[in-house]
Image (spheres, helix red, strand yellow):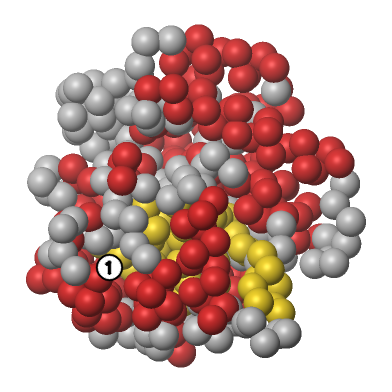
C-alpha cells in the first residue's frame, strides 16, 4: 500500500520521473448511460498496448459526475485491476481526487486501497478560499498518499493559483509531480519558477496538461535565474492529458522521439512543426472554438470511430458535441492522417474487447 513516495515501486517511480504518457481515462457508457464494463476495460487495455506508461482515472476526462452516480470506486477498481493485469504490474496508476478535505481524503484512501500510486488533487471545491487553506488541504491529502498538483484553467472548473502557492506546494515532501493545465504561458512559467526556486525540480516532476501547447511544453527548456548570476534549465518531462486518451500510440511515439533528444540538442524542424499540428487536432477534438464544452464528447467521438466505445454518451445528457465539431474532427483526420492510430486499433480491438487474450509485449 502506497503511503509515501518511498513506497512507490522503483520502476513506477522511475517512469514518473523520466516522464510518462498518462492518458486521462474516459468513461465508456452504453445507450442507457450505464457503465459499459467491457468497453471500459478495452480502453485500459488499449492504452497499455499502445505503450502508455499508465492511466489517470477519476479525472475530468473520466467525468467528475461519476461520484454522484456511484461510479467512482467501481471505475477506479476496474482500471487498476485491468492496467495492473495487462501491464504485468508496470503501469503507473493516478487517481483523481476532488471535493473538500473530508471527501478528498476519503477518495485518496479508497484509491490507495485499490493500489494507486498517486492522487491528482483537484481543488475546484475551494474556489474563493485563501491559498493557505488550499495548501493545508493538499498537505492533508499528502498525509494519505503521494500527491500530484493540478494547475487547471477556470474554463473547466479550475482555479488560478499564484507562484507563492506553487512554491509552497513544491515543498511538500510527498508531492511527486505537478500537472500544469492553465492553458496560459505566464501561469505555466509561474509553476516552473516556483518548483525551481523551491529546489524541487528533481523531486517534483513537471507534466504538461496544456492541450493547446503539448509539443513545445515537452521540447523547450525553461530558464530560471536566481538574480545572482545563477541559472537553471527546467524541463517538462511528460504529459497527463485528455488529448492523449485518443491516438495514444502516436503520442507514445512522439514522446519517445522527444526523450531521445539530448537536452542541449538542436530540435529538428519537423518535430517543432508537430506543435501546430497537435494543437490543431486538439482544437477540433477539444472543441476549442466553443470554450471546450465538447471536449469529453470529442474524445469519445474519436474512440467511437475506432470502435472502442459505442457512443459519445456522457452522464449529463446535455454534454454533447458542439455544432460543427464533428466536421472539425473530419477535417483534422483528413489533413493529418499520420496522427491517428486507427490501423493499430483495428488490428487489436477484438482482443481488447474479448474476455480472453493477452497484452502485447512491452518495450522497455
Q: Is 323 rendered above or below residue 348?
A: above
* Image quadrant where one finds the N terminus: bottom left
Which is more toward the observer, 128 or 253?
128
58 vs 287, left or right, is left
Apparent side of residue 138 relative to residue 290 in the rendered image (left or right): left
Q: Quadrant of the C terminus?
A: bottom right
> Looking at the picture, does residue 35 appear above or below residue 89?
above
Of 317 and 110, nearer the camera is 317
Q: Is residue 120 above or below residue 195?
A: above
Residue drawn at (55%, 86%) of the image: 199
Horizontally, is 235 left or right of 326 in the view? Answer: right
> x, y percentage for residue 205?
55, 72
Mark 1 closeness class: few <14, some 14–19, many ≥20 residues within 10 Å: many
Total number of numbered discs in the rendering: 1
Q: Where is residue 194 drawn, in percent x and y? A: 49, 74
Residue at 63 percent across and 53 percent down: it is 217
In the rendered image, residue 204, in percent from the top left (x then y), is placed at 51, 77
Whether residue 79 is visible here, answered yes or no, is: no
Q: Residue at x 18, y 74 (%)?
A: 133
Question: Is residue 251 in sight in this rendering?
Answer: yes
Residue 256: % across, % down: 74, 55
Q: Which residue is mark 1?
A: 111
**Residue drawn at point x = 38 percent, y = 31 percent:** 292
Secondary-structure class at tag 1: helix
Amino acid at each position: 500500500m502506497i503511503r509515501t513516495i518511498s513506497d512507490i515501486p522503483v520502476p513506477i517511480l522511475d517512469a514518473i520521473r523520466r516522464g510518462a504518457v498518462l492518458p486521462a481515462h474516459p468513461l465508456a457508457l452504453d445507450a442507457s448511460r450505464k457503465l459499459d464494463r467491457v468497453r471500459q476495460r478495452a480502453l485500459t487495455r488499449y492504452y497499455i498496448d499502445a505503450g502508455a506508461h499508465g492511466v489517470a482515472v477519476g479525472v475530468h476526462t473520466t467525468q467528475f459526475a461519476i461520484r454522484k452516480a456511484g461510479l467512482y470506486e467501481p471505475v477506479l477498481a476496474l482500471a487498476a485491476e485491468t492496467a495492473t493485469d495487462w501491464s504485468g504490474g508496470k503501469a503507473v496508476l493516478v487517481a483523481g481526487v476532488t471535493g473538500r478535505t473530508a471527501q478528498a481524503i476519503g477518495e485518496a484512501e479508497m484509491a490507495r486501497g485499490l493500489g494507486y500510486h498517486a492522487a491528482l488533487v483537484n481543488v475546484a471545491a475551494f474556489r474563493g478560499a485563501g491559498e493557505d487553506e488550499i495548501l493545508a488541504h493538499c498537505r492533508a491529502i499528502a498525509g494519505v498518499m503521494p500527491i500530484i498538483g493540478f494547475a487547471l484553467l477556470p474554463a473547466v472548473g479550475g482555479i488560478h493559483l499564484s507562484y507563492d502557492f506553487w512554491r509552497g506546494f513544491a515543498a511538500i515532501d510527498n508531492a511527486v509531480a505537478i500537472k500544469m493545465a492553465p492553458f496560459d504561458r505566464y501561469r505555466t512559467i509561474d509553476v516552473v519558477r516556483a518548483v525551481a526556486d523551491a529546489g524541487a525540480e528533481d523531486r517534483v516532476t513537471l507534466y504538461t496538461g496544456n492541450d493547446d501547447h503539448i509539443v513545445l511544453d515537452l521540447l523547450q527548456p525553461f530558464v530560471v535565474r536566481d538574480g545572482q548570476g545563477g541559472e537553471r534549465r527546467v524541463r517538462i518531462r511528460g504529459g497527463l492529458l485528455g488529448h492523449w486518451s485518443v491516438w495514444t500510440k502516436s503520442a507514445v511515439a512522439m514522446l519517445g522521439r522527444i526523450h531521445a533528444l539530448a537536452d542541449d540538442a538542436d530540435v529538428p524542424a519537423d518535430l517543432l512543426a508537430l506543435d501546430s499540428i497537435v494543437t490543431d487536432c486538439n482544437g477540433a477534438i477539444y472543441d476549442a472554438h466553443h470554450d471546450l464544452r465538447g471536449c469529453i464528447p470529442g474524445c469519445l467521438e474519436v474512440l467511437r470511430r475506432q470502435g472502442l466505445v459505442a457512443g459519445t454518451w456522457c452522464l449529463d445528457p446535455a454534454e454533447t458535441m458542439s455544432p460543427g465539431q464533428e466536421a472539425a474532427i473530419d477535417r483534422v483526420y483528413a489533413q493529418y492522417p499520420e496522427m491517428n492510430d486507427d490501423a493499430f486499433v483495428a488490428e487489436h480491438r477484438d482482443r481488447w474487447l474479448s474476455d480472453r487474450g493477452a497484452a502485447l509485449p512491452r518495450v522497455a
